[in-house]
Image (cartoon, rainbow, N blue to C red):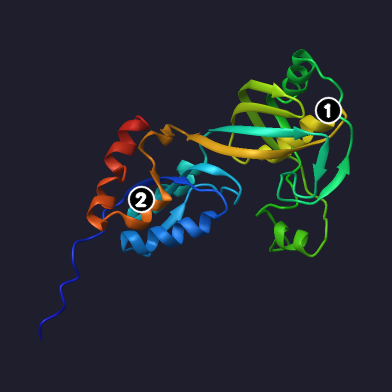
Amino acid sequence: MNRPNPGPMVPSGVLLVDKAPDMTSHDVVAIARRSLGTKKIGHCGTLDPMATGLLMLVVERATKIQDLLMSEDKEYQGTLTLGKVTSSQDRQGEVTEEKEVPAFTAAQVDAAFGEFTGAFEQIPPMVSAIKKDGVPLYKLARKGQEVERAPRPVTVSKYEISRIELPEVDFTVNCSKGFYVRTYAHDIGGKLGCGAHLSALRRTRSGRFTLERAITVDQLKTMPREELWKTLVSLAEISLMRGA
């Protein structure tokens, strides 16, 4: 009895995708699962729907190093908007507090950012995937519930402010695993006394991976499968990159 040809095996590796706005990380995984022809796939670190930039997808045997890749430091470019606090700490939430924005100097803004460098603790936002009694916090937040969250240790190794046009401030931050950039924006606004929320976010690096080799979501949808396979960063290359 002849068995059907299973076709070529899906290679193992990491697919770098430049996530588009207004879609979830899970949406990208679902598209990649169909395009690559595999069920064995996951991502290394959620990006919120409003965020864009580097989403790392682990494919086939690369799923075994998912935790290792997720533990590495990351770089983000963001914009915070002063004067408005939101329920989600970003522009997708409801405005819960509004204050006038003083005419801050660049030195005053920089001093507020400087308060959140090195090692410190963050209280995770309610709109997050952290679980309380087995239930993700974002599900409780949707019901209007707020629960106590334990502070978590995080690290900012470097930051840079690239534009101040009040009420907006553009910045780049290099941070540890588990860092919430919207909480960072929220806390800086609190330090300045007028409140703030994150109004734009783009992940530009994770560990040694950057956007340089990333494909767009449109390419992920339309590229021929064999061509898509060739864009994967192989396990051998990852070992070399990590000095293993």
Instruction: Residue under label 2, please give it.
Output: 219
Regarding residue 179, the answer to whether it shows in the image is: no
Find numbered disc 2 in the image and state the secondary structure of the residue it sits on: helix
In the picture, the quarter occupied by the C terminus is top left
| 134 vs 96, nearest the viewer | 96
Q: Earlier in the sequence, mark 2 or mark 1?
A: 1
What x and y, as percent, mark residue 70? 50, 43
Find numbered disc 1 in the image and state the secondary structure of the residue it sits on: helix
| 71 vs 199, nearest the viewer | 199
Write down the quadrant of residue 140 in the picture: bottom right
Within 10 Å of the Cα at label 1, are there few (<14), some (14-19), or many (20+) other Cα atoms? some
The residue at 83%/56% (across/down) is 146
Question: Residue most toward the front?
Answer: 165
| 222 vs 71, nearest the viewer | 222
Regarding residue 132, the answer to whether it shows in the image is: yes
| 165 vs 199, nearest the viewer | 165
Residue type at tag 2: Gln
Asked if the residue at tag 1 contacts the one at tag 2, i.e. Cβ–Cβ closer than 8 Å, the answer is no
The residue at 42%/60% (across/down) is 31
Tell me if 72 is positioned left or right of 101 in this view: left
Front of the two marks 2 and 1: 2
Instruction: Residue under label 1, please give it.
Output: 191
